[in-house]
Amino acid sequence: MRGREGSAMRNQDTHRKLHELFNERQLDEMDHHVGAEFAYIDHPRRGTMHTLAQFKEWLGEWISAFSDARVIGASYVDGPGFSVAYFHGRGENDGPLGKHEPTGRQMDMAFCETLRYDEHGRVIGGEVYYDQLTLLAQLGLVEQAATRRA
């Protein structure tokens, strides 16, 4: 991948760009940054997307559940063939989340995402980690143990 003035983009620049495209809801623009082979794992939900189309559908599910969802406060670490992003996901649950009706409550929680790159700097895979229990508790869909004891 090439950045400004023909210089090679660092992996973290590509990672940052993908987050910007998510925030701007320009998911189809992600095609320019992803290789032909692609796999992405959502560890908390135990789901794997094997194509870019499946990945964009998965992102669409997040957007449907949190129409104002944003990646905020991100920091990126670059490495040979990979990048890591630590960020907060924030948004109001104004659409269905799986089988759950919208709650109108805010999600604001930490995520850790890794992306892997081919020799041309295109994303070929990734993984995301987040605390699903925190998400469900923030939305009022489960009661946290500490709250029950009080």
Image (cartoon, grey):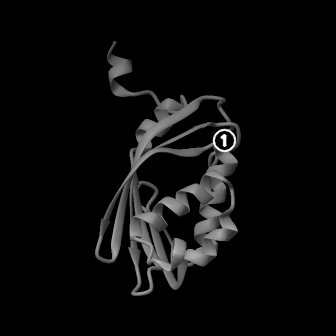
- Residue 136 x/y as whole percent: 49, 37
- The residue drawn where x is 40% and y is 64% is 12
Whether residue 111 appears in this view of the structure is yes
Residue assigned mark 1: 68
Between 123 and 92, the one nearer to me in the picture: 123
98 vs 131, nearest the viewer: 131
- Residue drawn at x 53%, y 62% as measured from the top left: 17
- Asked which quadrant contains residue 102, the reply is top right
* Residue at the front extreme of this rendering: 5
Q: In the image, is residue 99 above or below residue 83?
A: above
Nearer to the camera, 145 or 124: 124
Relative to 89, 10 lies left or right: left
Q: Which residue is found at the position 42% from the left and 69% from the top?
A: 126
Q: Quadrant of residue 84?
A: bottom left
- Is residue 1 visible to us here? no
Q: Position of residue 23 (x, y in %)?
A: 61, 51
Locate residue 60, reporting x and y percent.
66, 58
In the rendered structure, the answer to whether residue 62 lies left or right of residue 37 reads: right
- How would you rate the neighbour count of disc 1 (Cα within 10 Å): few for under 14, some for 14-19, many for 20 or more? some
Tell me which amino acid carries mark 1.
Answer: Asp
Q: Is residue 70 above or below residue 47?
A: above
- Between residues 59 and 75, which one lies in front from this camera angle? 75
* 6 sits to left or right of 85: right
Does dot 1 land on a helix, a strand or a loop? Answer: loop
Quadrant including the C terminus? top left
> How many numbered marks are there?
1
Against 149, residue 4 (above or below) is below
Residue displayed at 58% across by 68% down: 55
Q: Residue furthest left?
A: 79
